Amino acid sequence: MAKANTVVVLDFETTGLSPDMGDRAIEIGAVRIEAGEITGRFQELMNPGRRIDPFIENYTGITNDMLKDAPPCAEVMHRFADFIAGCNLVAHNASFDKRFLDAELRAISRHYSGDFACSLLVARRIYQEAPNHQLGTLVNYANIPAQGVFHRALYDSEMTSKLWLAMLDDIEERYDLPNVPFALIQKLVKTPKKSVHKFLSNWQ
């Protein structure tokens, strides 16, 4: 059974909120974790084929000048498809990143075999007392050292991976569940918050 501590944690920076509205990826960052240890990293800018607006430049720190000479999305996404091959995937607010991953891979006729899990949905169940469940807030809440700038893809992936491993450690410690399986996480995120304790206590 696949373990939750062997995954690729990924993050996209994009031109906007929806590939259905024509938005494209402009940066992908990812961290490969195997048995709880970071074993690989991936980070590339990609040229979406058009200029990005000032809001996105300010929000991400990624400028049109930086993207001008970057490789096109298709080229980067072929490399990224190789990087994630056979791995389960994690992202913070995964529905957003999954939409862009699916759209960019569909454009180059590539696929992935792994399942997705959302660290935000896990945090809402494991850290119910957190002030909110934004990545930066959760990093502080879990006492994870942070030195960098959020909204760049590799840094966000690094912080999400540390948060992910911290949550797995907390589950293992609280409920005496060594080597949390990925299947448990997939069921946990669909469990009502009030039922989380019972669900984890009864997991076999």
Image (cartoon, rainbow, N blue to C red):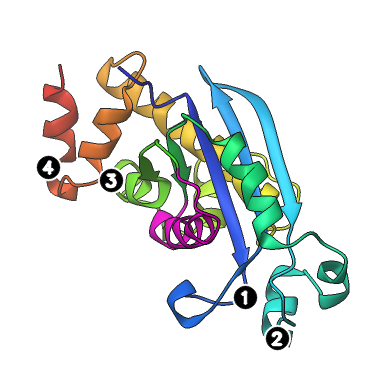
Q: For the residue carrying disc 1, how many other residues have a C-alpha within 10 Å: few (<14), some (14-19), or many (20+)?
A: many
Marker disc for residue 15: 1
Left or right: residue 119 compared with residue 52:
left
Residue hosting label 2: 53
Q: Amino acid at mark 4?
A: Ser
Rounded to the nearest angstrom, the CA distance separating label 1 from label 4 is 38 Å
Query: In what element is the residue under mark 1?
Result: loop
Q: Amino acid at mark 3?
A: Arg
Q: For the residue carrying disc 2, how many other residues have a C-alpha within 10 Å: few (<14), some (14-19), or many (20+)?
A: few
Looking at the rendered image, the quarter that the C terminus falls into is top left
The quadrant holding residue 2 is: top left
* Magenta stretch prevailing secondary structure: helix
* Label 3 close to label 2 by CB (< 8 Å): no
Q: Is residue 196 magenta?
A: no
Residue hosting label 4: 195
Left or right: residue 11 compared with residue 153:
left
